[in-house]
Amino acid sequence: MDAAFETYSLMRADFELYRHSSFLRAHTELRGELVNDAGRAARIDPVSLFLGPRYRVDRYASEELKAWFAEHGRLTVEEFEMQWWNGRDGGLGAPDRIALAEIA
């Protein structure tokens, strides 16, 4: 396997852990109130709000989830990758970022 592909795969696996952990944490803290009425009517999967484009959050996320993202952050794959490369010390640093140790 190509070393670059293997490294990218490791980063994506770490991102999926971050994304899944963020979803579980928000789901627990917000008691499942993640989508608004428009999201329920459109049958939006709440998990998709943790990965899809920002406009989907603006359109379908509950006010509680929008506030949760404002407090805890919502990293895109690109933002996560940049931090992953710049801070491979086991943590992602700032308050709007989650330490990798908290994911597991």
Image: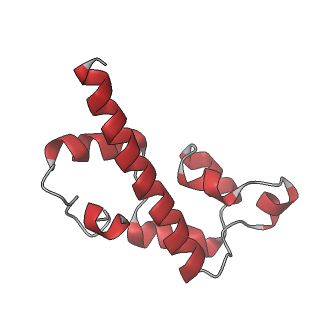
Rendered position, 28 above or below 87: below
What is the quadrant of the N terminus in the image?
top left
Residue 74 percent location from the top left of the image:
44, 57
State the residue at coordinates (24%, 45%).
84
Residue 29 percent location from the top left of the image:
54, 82
Rendered position, 77 above or below 50: above
Residue 50 located left or right of residue 98:
right
What is the quadrant of the C terminus in the image?
bottom left
Nearer to us in this view, 100 or 77: 100
Q: Specify the color scheme.
A: secondary structure
Rendered position, 95 above or below 28: above
For the image, the number of numbered tags is 0
Nearer to us in this view, 60 or 23: 23
Residue 21 percent location from the top left of the image:
46, 64
Residue 28 located left or right of residue 38:
left
Q: Residue furthest front?
A: 1
Nearer to us in this view, 53 or 5: 5
Where residue 91 sits, quadrant-wise, is bottom left
Residue 18 percent location from the top left of the image:
40, 57
Nearer to us in this view, 90 or 50: 90
Residue 81 located left or right of residue 52:
left
Q: Residue furthest right?
A: 41
Residue 94 located left or right of residue 41:
left
| Residue 65 seen by the camera | yes
| Residue 67 seen by the camera | no
State the residue at coordinates (62%, 56%).
47
State the residue at coordinates (68%, 75%).
33
Q: Residue furthest top?
A: 2
State the residue at coordinates (76%, 54%).
44
